[in-house]
Amino acid sequence: MTGKKAILSLITTALVLLLTACGGGATSSSQPTPTTEEARPTRTPRPAGNVTSPTTAPTTAPTTDTTVEQAPVLSTNADLTALGNVQVEMKLEGTSQESGQEAEPFNLVMQQIILANGDRSLTMESTSPESGLVRIISVQVGGQVYQYVEDSNQPYCMAMGNFDLFSGSMLTPDALIGSIPEAQLVERGVQVNGFTTDRYTFTINEQTPNYQGEAKGEIWAAQDPAVVVRHIGEFTGTITGVTTEEGGTPLPGQLGNIRWEYNVTQLDANTNITLPETCAQQQAAGAEIPLPANISNRVQMGDLISFETTESPDNIVSFYQTEMVAQGWQAGEVSQYGSDYQLTFSKDGRTATILVSVIDNKTSVIIMLASS
């Protein structure tokens, strides 16, 4: 566990994203911002709840052992793409405390689905008395990335081009307690989550400035393929670090008495990932808006689309004056102030307002859709 000073930030970041997502969904003239760690809110939330029941209990074979042995793989950081269609789930509960405040329970569930065709999804879910159930789903389908937020308010979706929402986003036991130096082999030939595994137990005592306590648990490791398919345990003690208060002020904080359950499960070959209904409706609504080639930072949230391009404002204006009409839109007024443009179009009781400007030497485009 030595050197894992960032774990408090990892967990609180995920919880912050979930509980502060409730304020999202409003449309404005500024570019939408995806819910990522780089754009995370700045106050530690206080979720509460219980981790849901585990998956089906492992079916054990009669072969047992009591040998202390290093498993072929005891790391949960292994590449899982070779497994075909697979689901990875991490459930975590414990207590979270900010400096000078009472410790409060938290509950976090993260589930990632990885398909052989390149599609994937990542779901983060938590429950609190203040916000109820909050769920953030990041989906990559056909090379297009979406982020869907569901809470007690109206759900909303953002389409974000090929923005990477998955790298480093899945919390694993290795991120929580570090690698396991050694473990005791208990059983061989245990069937769990569709794999044949060997079961190990471990105990780690840690006394460092950031970790004070003991971690113990069990690991089910497959040899072919070499991957940890189940990892459960409990850390009794405290993990201290730094959280961020409103205004960006760093404050000491800590996590305590953490329990986790990690599972890797193989999925059927015909498994598909479908968009949440709100995202599918948004995708259909934006299908009639042409987009130029070579754009970046594309984001769509509700009736707002934005992107950047290295093309000049004049070229973008010319593109939309031609392509919108080709899509059946009727051109309206055009206004210009220097390099800033505003174009309007109408079609079947709807309007599209296109704002073109230059920001940081790039052409910025914002498209606002509305019903007439």
Image: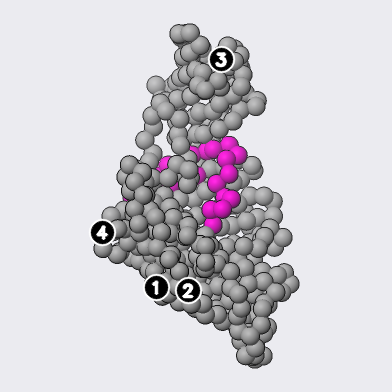
Residue that appears at 73% across and 72% down:
224
Q: Earlier in the sequence, mark 4 or mark 3?
A: 4
Q: What residue do we see at 58% from left, 37% from top? A: 161
The vertical placement of 149 against 271, above or below, is above
Task: Return the disc, 1 or 2, that comes first in the chain's sequence.
Answer: 2
In the displayed structure, does residue 226 sit left or right of residue 147? Answer: right
Is 163 colored magenta in this rendering? yes
Residue at disc 1, secondary structure = strand
**Which image quadrant for residue 64?**
bottom right
Q: Position of residue 313 (x, y in %)?
A: 56, 15
Q: Is residue 219 visible?
A: yes
- Image quarter where the C terminus lies is top left
Camera-nearest label, 3 or 1 = 1
179 over 250 or under it: above or below: below
The residue under label 1 is 237
Give the distance between the C-alpha atoms of the residues marked 3 and 1, in whole angstroms: 58 Å
Q: Residue at x 58, y 69 (%)?
A: 179
Judge whether 217 appears above or below 110 on screen. Answer: below
Q: Amino acid at mark 2?
A: Glu
| Residue bearing the label numbered 2 | 206
